[in-house]
Amino acid sequence: MSAQPNSLTIPQGSSGSTIILLTSVNGFQGNVSLTPPVSCLAIGCPSYTINPTRVSLVANGSGKAVFTIYTYSQTPLNTYNVAVSGTSGNLSHTASVTYTVVPPQSGPDFSISANPANQTVVAGSSGKSLIILTSLNGFSGTVSLTTSPPPLCVSCPNWGLNSSSVKLSSGGTASSTLTFSSTLGTPPRNWVVVVTGTSGSLSHNVSVTFTVVPSSPPPDFTIIANPNSLNIPAGTTGKSTITLTSLNSFSGTVNLYTSPSPLCPSPQCSTWSIDPTSVNLSPDGSATATLSIFGGTQGGFGNVTVYGNSGSLSHSVIVSFKITQPPDFTITISPSSQTVRKGSITTFSINVTGTNGFNNTVDLSTTISPVTRHGPTTSLPSTVGPYSTSTLTVSTMRGTQLGTYTIIVTATSGSLTHTFTVTVTVTS
């Protein structure tokens, strides 16, 4: 902690200010509470204020506060030594200030003021204050102007005067412009700039407070998909709702398009489209579009990117999909052929297996050709389960004609139908 300046001359009945500068050492960061000296209770005792009473320090950064001393017409003419205390946890430091109270000045002098003395600045922008100097009691001459030093952190603001000295004529005024510049990352807080005017032994200062507030985010929009993952049976269409929402009062037209579909023919490959291809958003409103994905018969999986563009704004969302085959079943019969003597029987094993989650019953029937008198006959269960093994029995008679017979077994479940063919050769 230090005071800049650390010594002041204050005319009786006037006030004087100095900057208390706090600097982080060895990476210190945290809040430092500031306490001014305690004023005595006698008539004419000086009084003290510190603004702000708490300063936040970032690692290796700096901060400041304004220490003001007020004297009165009864304040004794003397030299005073006081100190401002700063504490943070178990850490404590002081900054010493010496000031001398002198008789009220009645000779040539000047005053210094700021217009405005307080203003709000949005982070990332700048503010200006006019520093006005006025001749008093016939003062004329050059007044040198300086400011308290800007902090040294990366996102901290900077400031400066457009003129470091002004000339005052007797009874006249002059001015210099104080410019305060912030960045988007400037911490939101009160930043106090002390401008000091000096001419010979005369010195006066004025404090200007710039209150930095966060900048408002620009208008924008979001885009989401519901659902963002689809399981689509082959040969059917899956849909996802694309929702666009205005942010920070965005309004306008958002154009929609998708990543390109594969360059192979439908229905083998999957294809997709977005409808509508543009939506209008009102401030803080929302709108929807529909992404339709046709599931190709060859199966597979993939991703579709939906893009939304409006001027320089662009956002996207990804919808993943997987093509699933519909529930089905297979039928196999073994062996594929048999030889049987007239008047005997033979059997085949029938296996029905569900696929892709199929879980329905299957109806079985047979046809036999050629159709002859006393030809072979068949028997088998009329209904079997989706994961079953059953028996096809073929019977012949003594009068069955010799030769080869074709048996077609038809398996049906709803709209699904599959067949399997076996042969039986009848011998003597």
Image: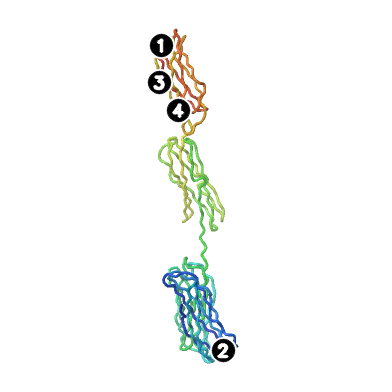
Query: Which residue was labeled with disc 2?
Result: 75
For this view, does 342 lie left or right of residue 10? left
Residue 283 is situated, as x and y percent measured from the top left of the image, at 56, 56
Q: Is residue 178 above or below residue 103?
A: above
Which numbered disc flags the more N-terminal residue, 1 or 4? 4
Residue at the spot 47% in from the left edge and 55% down from the top edge: 313
For the rendered model, the colour scheme is: rainbow
Q: Secondary structure at mark 4?
A: strand
Give the spatial CA distance, label 4 vs label 3.
15 Å
Q: Position of residue 217 (x, y in %)?
A: 51, 61
Residue bearing the label numbered 4: 330
Q: Mark 1 belongs to which amino acid?
A: Arg
- Which of the two labelled residues, at mark 1 and mark 3, occupies the earlier sequence position? 3
Give the answer, above or below, for where 288 lies relative to 161. Answer: above
Disc 1 to disc 3, how far (Cα)?
17 Å
**Dot 2: element:** loop
Q: Measured from the top left, where is residue 162 in percent x and y?
A: 45, 77
Compare marks 1 and 2 and give the one earlier in the sequence.
Answer: 2
Mark 1 sits on what residue? 341
Which amino acid type is shown beneath numbered disc 4? Thr
The reply to whether discs 4 and 2 touch (Cβ–Cβ < 8 Å) is no
Check disc 3: other Cα within 10 Å, few if <14, some if 14-19, many if 20+. Answer: few
Q: Secondary structure at mark 3?
A: loop
Q: Name the residue that disc number 3 marks.
A: 336
User: Real-space Cα distance between discs 1 and 2?
Assistant: 139 Å
| Front in this rendered view, residue 330 or 164 | 330
Residue at left offset 47%, top offset 33%: 356
| Amino acid beneath label 2 | Thr
Dot 2 crowding, Cα within 10 Å, few <14, some 14–19, many 20+: some
